[in-house]
Amino acid sequence: MEQPKHALSEVQTSAQSHGDPQKMVRVYLAIFAALAILTVLTVWVNSLHVTRVTAISIAAFIALVKVTLIAMFFMHLKVEGKWIYGVVVLSLIAILILIFLISPDIAGILGGARS
Amino acid sequence: MQTPATEGHAVAGGHEAHPELPFIRKYVFSTDHKIIGIQYMITSLVFLLSGFAMMLLMRWQLAFPGKPIPLIGAFLPETMAPGGVMLPEFYNMLGAMHGTIMVFLGVVPLGVAAFGNFVLPLQIGAKDMAFPFLNMLSYWIFLIGGTLMLSSFLLPGGAAQSGWTSYSPLADLADGILQKSGWDAVLTGQTMWLISMTFIITSSLFGAINFIVTTMNLRARGMTWMRLPFFVWCQFVTAILLVLAFPVLQGGAILQLMDRLGKANFFIPANLIFGGAPVDQPGGGNPLLWQHLFWFLAHPEVYVLLLPEFGIVAEILASGTRKPLFGYKELVISLCAIGGLSFIVWAHHMFLSGMRTDVTKFFTVTTMLISIPSVMVLTCFLLSLRNGSIHFTTPMLFALAFVPMFGIGGLTGLPLGFTPTDIYLHDTLYVIGHFHYVVVTGSLIALFAGIYYWFPKMFGRTMNVFWGKVHFWISIIAMNGIFLPMMVQGVSGVLRRQYDPSFQIHNRPTLILNLVMSGSALVLALAQIPFIVNFFHSLFYGRKVESNPWKATTLDWAACPSPPPHGNFAEEITIHRGPYEYSVPGHKTDWSPQHIADQHLVGGPRPQQQQAQE
Amino acid sequence: MSAARIPWILDPSDEPTSTGVPHGKLGMWVFLASEVMLFGSLISSYIVLRLGSPLFIMPPHEMLGVPIAFVNTLILIISSVTMVLALAAIQQNKPGQMIGYMAATILCGLLFLAVKAYEYPHKWVDLGITMSSGLFGSFYFTMTGLHGLHVLGGLAFNTYILIQGVRGKWSPHRCERVEYAGIYWHFVDLVWVVLFPLLYLL
């Protein structure tokens, strides 16, 4: 039988679930440094002379890393449970479906037989 | 059976009674899910009626092209029907607005917002939604959006004419928008369609968030996922569809709005000829992109039109047959399969758009696949009737009719999902017949069933049984009278969205059917009069009932009075069994409420003893 | 010390939930799922038209204004850090520090919008990149415009948090709304992190 969780006697302050705030401050500042460096990196790589595909891949990869850092640490996704992960994963699947299924038709890529 | 003790002014739920709210906070700007549900119900029924009236006008034109509209023709302005004769532009407006209103302002708010809001918290044992204030906001935003949408008829140039699908490049350039700027551009029918949709989408999103969090978080103790009434599952999956799909249409609508107001070219191709003249725009956009963005929402949207109604029918079938639903687990799995697959079938609406064949192949396969869980659900409903003790109440009549009618609707969809046959059938009246079978004889019938079923819970009185059955029989026959001939016309090749079908020679043999269809439409209109009178008369003079007239097992019926007080339940609910424990051997009655412990139910003659007595 | 709380009357935020996740947090994440789809649909549209439309003409790289956008990106990232530091501050029962960090967050947000307010006229007056000048211009203004509206919404939410903080409403046991405002604000930053390379670099 399912008991409702989060009963009053067990209310955690958000601090307790996120980890000791004092320690977390150092983590946040480290993530900030990482994000700043990655932003500089994005701009610098853009100035290099590489093929289109390479440029897009690198930019996408760096953006992915930054997005993951923000989501995991600033939005505390790292400590959240399966329900929040489920919400996030569902939305990612849905948006990937959109972009991959309209690409063959509108962008002319990722498809099979044309005509 | 035991019912919660308290009624009257004592507030349920164990929280402190607060002071009596003024009328406007209690019934107008209410945050109580029950009041909001009833507000949605009345409002969406009014919108349904307005969309129906538009359809009646269209049906007159189709049956008697070029003849003045009787009675109201004289009152229509010159811009719509000079001399009472409908202009083609007005016909287009009626068509576009009929579709938009019925889908977004009629069926969805009724199925999702009205019934979902009223019933869902009751069925999970909650005292209200997770976000009551947001709930109230949802309703008022919906009302504003709906009013804007209807009022677009009054704009210069009239309402939107580009179908409920608002296809580019027509919708991007309609109303001579390229020559307009500023407020002139905003106050056009097509622009107002886009703005109204923004309000409607926002309202739906807020509502869907509420439903998802409520279902996940506010279940009573012991209410595990697999003990939820099927209606709750349906609303939950529907809400997920809304959250993930609606924003994509919003994105597309923003782009189309920018095409109109900002003279962008998102969906306008190069070298476009519009209305005989070249369009003075560089182009570069792709009209198919609009179709993709639109149908990415609009296909899950048709499941939004359908799934809550599955839930309604399930509830009524279970209580009306006095036996558990057949295959609860299979129903839930099929529901989730339908929900998931609904995201990858959308382009079956676009088979003739000029898409690449690899894309059409993919979507044909997925469309064929999604028919499987749909058939599974219908089969489970059918098998639920086997060996049941069927009580032919008014809601049960509607629920029973749903099964074969939706079967016809669903099966007629298969040739549309299969590309070789769709090449012939696309844009014919066959398509209209198909989706009206699903939505009118399917969803709308189920919604009527829901109204008759939950009316006693909402208002503490029943609707009149005789007039309910009259409403049922005339409606179901009239509905078939409209849409069966339509399928015949469609297969003969009569195209949709045509102002005067006598134009095309190949239509002529089946034109006579228009008389049958329009006559049936009139009969259907007349059949709603007993319903409307019954509804309002029963509100005040209907026979009063106790809390559980249907002797149902779910919490909405068994655990709270009719109507439920603020806070719904007198004490904390604990769930002991599944939602459809009817006719359990060894129990005192043929219905075992979810929240009553075993020891209160067991007893009375055991089955062996009963047999011996025979 | 926060006001004495009578234990048997639950604040809605302390209600037990079947999942263990508070309503507000779950609701905020579901809302963000819808925002992923909204911005995702626009980003997808940009990508497919950019790749598939022969008339999609990119302005020359120098015209895109990378340096100023780079600074703007850093401003938004800084505002994200100050936001999460504000949450950490109130979790450590330092309301004064929290107010300071919230003010900094709002200031950075306003700065971001101010830079945009400079960028927009510069683009359409000096460079001729407008909503109707071509697909790039249309996408640029639509997407950054929608993002800007979301920044504005976030600023409104953050201002509410700040004002309530000044009135002493937040405490280590009562700071979940600060967290939710933060989740939303970080998402706004996250969207910009994707838009920046998409619209300025590639």
Image: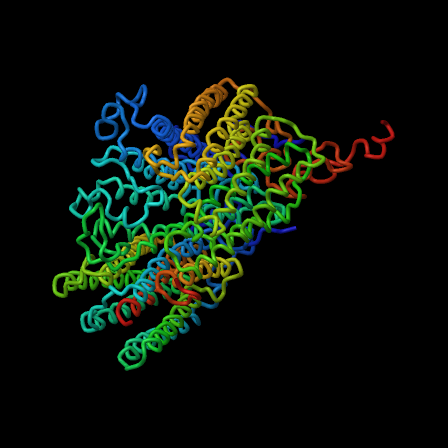
**Residue B200: x %, y % from top left:** 36, 42
Q: Is residue B421 left or right of residue C57?
A: right
Q: Residue furthest bottom?
A: A49
Q: Residue furthest top?
A: B541
Say above or below: C84 vs B434: below
Q: Which quarter shows the N terminus of chain B?
A: top right
Q: How many marks?
A: 0
**Residue B169: x %, y % from top left:** 28, 50
Q: Nearer the viewer, residue B12 or C134?
A: C134
Q: Quadrant of residue C86?
A: bottom left
Say above or below: C57 vs B434: below
**Residue C16: x %, y % from top left:** 54, 50
Residue occupying the point 23% across, 47% down: B173
Q: Residue furthest left?
A: C126
Q: Is residue C143 left or right of residue B605?
A: left
- The answer to whether residue B466 of the structure is visible from this angle is yes
Q: Nearer the viewer, residue B215 or B507?
A: B507
Q: Nearer the viewer, residue B67 or A4?
A: B67
How does the figure colour the protein chain or chains? rainbow
Q: Quadrant of residue B562?
A: top right
- The answer to whether residue C1 of the structure is visible from this angle is no
